Amino acid sequence: MEIFFVVFISYLSGSIPFGLLLSKTFSKVDIRTIGSGNIGATNVLRTGNKYLAGLTLLLDIIKGFVPVILSLKYYPELVQLSCLMAFLGHLFPIWLKFKGGKGVATYLGILFALSVQLSLLFIFTWLIVSLIFKYSSVSSMFSSLTVFIVAFVKDTALQSINPKMFVDEDLKFILFIFFILIIFTHRKNIFNLKNKTEHKIKI
């Protein structure tokens, strides 16, 4: 019974399409018809409303954080499942015929619940890469790869950040799964990058 509860709550939380709801409510725009057609914060930014984009980012982070932090407290043995279902909820929301976003903000929320150090590493890497290349997609893929690599080589890089931090095999496994899924959700961006048609970040 517990496993079904965790699956349901985690997926339901992850599946809330905040970007679409906010843009339709306040800008009267369906963001699925503009830019990349994505329901995430980056595409909301293309509507020209920075405040809605920032709110979308925050809420997408929260919807990943909440179910995982609750699972850590009440069902620690099901944390990995909670992480995966919250992420898949954003990627494949039942409300939008299973056509969701790319999951980066939701991934960050999950990461905050699992490890503040790794989430800060993700943010730092994302900012540096985006400043250099100006592509949100490149920043997201590279940052998720960096987080996985750092977690994987915990005995060197990670312990230099926090000597007391312990990274178990389950965490490394779920971070690897997330990296693969983020690459999958950015497959169109990879194609656009090859053809030099990818949209740059405009702030």
Image (tube, rainbow, N blue to C red):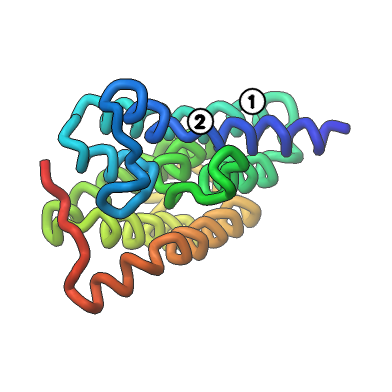
Residue drawn at 64 percent across, 25 percent down: 70
Quarter location, residue 135: bottom left
Residue 164 is at least partly visible in this image: no
Residue assigned mark 1: 70
Residue 138 versus residue 196 in the image, above or below: above
For the residues marked 1 and 2, what is the alpha-carbon distance in whole angstroms? 12 Å
How would you rate the neighbour count of disc 1 (Cα within 10 Å): few for under 14, some for 14-19, many for 20 or more? some
Residue 201 versus residue 186 in the image, above or below: above
The image position of residue 190, as x and y in percent, is 32, 71
The image position of residue 86, as x and y in percent, is 59, 40
The image position of residue 132, as x and y in percent, is 12, 58
Nearer to the camera, 187 or 35: 35
Residue assigned mark 2: 63
The image position of residue 154, as x and y in percent, is 47, 56
* Farthest residue, direction bottom: 194
How would you rate the neighbour count of disc 2 (Cα within 10 Å): few for under 14, some for 14-19, many for 20 or more? many
- Left or right placement of residue 104 versus residue 43 in this view: right
Give amino acid for label 1. Leu
Residue 90 is at least partly visible in this image: yes
Residue drawn at 40 percent across, 41 percent down: 105
Quarter location, residue 141: bottom left
Q: Looking at the rendered structure, which numbered label has been put on residue 93?
A: none
At mark 1, the secondary structure is helix
- Whether label 1 touches label 2, CB < 8 Å: no
* Farthest residue, direction top: 26
Give amino acid for label 2. Lys
Q: Nearer the viewer, mark 1 or mark 2?
A: 2
First in residue order: circle 1 vs circle 2 = 2
The count of marks equals: 2
Residue 27 versus residue 183 in the image, above or below: above
Give the quadrant of the C terminus. top left
Residue drawn at 26 percent across, 71 percent down: 192
